[in-house]
Image (tube, rainbow, N blue to C red):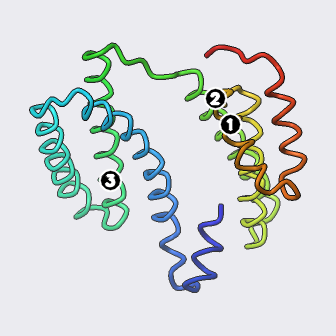
């Protein structure tokens, strides 16, 4: 939501065509976070053969997808190649982790996050349908954050430990986060449901 007004504000309208690239790269950087648990698992297992295969696979998939997509689609082809690389590598090693130690994805929180993002995105789409002015992009981004955050709590994505960490951080600015702190503390006083 903030990509278009931020790019125009910082770089001017001549760079407005780069907004979709920025949006996709932000999305892909979020996807890349899924690689952290897999990388940690590989460090714990300490299987050098698997780590070598992983490094070579990243290089091969990256080169192949770049050679296939960039000449045809240009800059968006480079973005697509990054996406292919991320999905292939993360998916492949998630399957490996499952076979190696029976790793299970926490599907309930993942689906809760996806549902929250979809609903918050729909709310933003409706706001932009009303007006596509730059100020509406700023407002839409703020609304997205608030709706997404609230829905992740409603869908019980947050564990008790997550909530306690958030409360600890917000206690540093009680004037700013007072209402949110009271709401979180009320949620913490309820018995937590197991995921």
Task: Give me the residue at 43% from left, 44% from top.
Answer: 33
Tell me: residue 16, above or below residue 154. Answer: below
CB under 8 Å between callouts 1 and 2? yes
Marks 2 and 3, how far apart at CA: 26 Å
Q: Is residue 187 left or right of residue 47?
A: right
| Label 3: which secondary element | helix
- Location of the C terminus (image quadrant): top right
Q: What residue sits right under mark 1 in the picture?
A: 116
Q: Nearer the viewer, residue 94 or 2?
A: 94
Look at 68% across and 36% down and name the residue there.
116
Percent across and percent down for residue 148 are 71, 43
In the rendering, at what x and y percent does residue 169 appear? Answer: 70, 49
Marker disc for residue 82: 3
- Corner quadrant of residue 36: top left
Which residue is disc 2 drawn over?
112
For marks 1 and 3, the one nearer the N-term is 3
Instruction: Look at the numbered discs 2 and 3 and tell me whether their residues touch, using CB distance below 8 Å.
Output: no
Label 2 vs 3, first from the N-terminus: 3
Q: Are marks 1 and 3 in contact (CB under 8 Å)?
A: no
Judge from the rendering whether residue 46 lies leftward or rightward of residue 18; answer left or right.
Answer: left
């Amino acid at each position: 939501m903030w990509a278009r007004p931020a790019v125009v504000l910082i770089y001017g309208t001549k760079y407005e065509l780069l907004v979709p690239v920025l949006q996709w790269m932000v999305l892909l950087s979020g996807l890349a976070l899924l690689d952290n648990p897999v990388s940690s698992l590989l460090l714990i297992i300490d299987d050098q053969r698997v780590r070598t295969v992983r490094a070579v696979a990243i290089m091969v998939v990256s080169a192949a997808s770049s050679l296939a997509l960039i000449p045809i689609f240009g800059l968006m082809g480079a973005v697509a190649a990054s996406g292919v690389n991320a999905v292939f590598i993360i998916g492949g090693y998630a399957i490996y982790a499952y076979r190696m130690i029976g790793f299970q994805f926490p599907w309930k929180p993942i689906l809760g996050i996806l549902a929250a993002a979809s609903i918050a995105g729909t709310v933003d789409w409706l706001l932009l349908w009303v007006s596509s002015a730059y100020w509406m992009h700023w407002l839409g981004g703020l609304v997205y954050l608030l709706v997404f955050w609230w829905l992740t709590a409603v869908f019980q994505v947050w564990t008790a430990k997550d909530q306690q960490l958030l409360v600890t951080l917000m206690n540093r600015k009680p004037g700013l986060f007072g209402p949110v702190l009271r709401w979180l503390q009320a949620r913490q006083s309820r018995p937590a449901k197991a995921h």
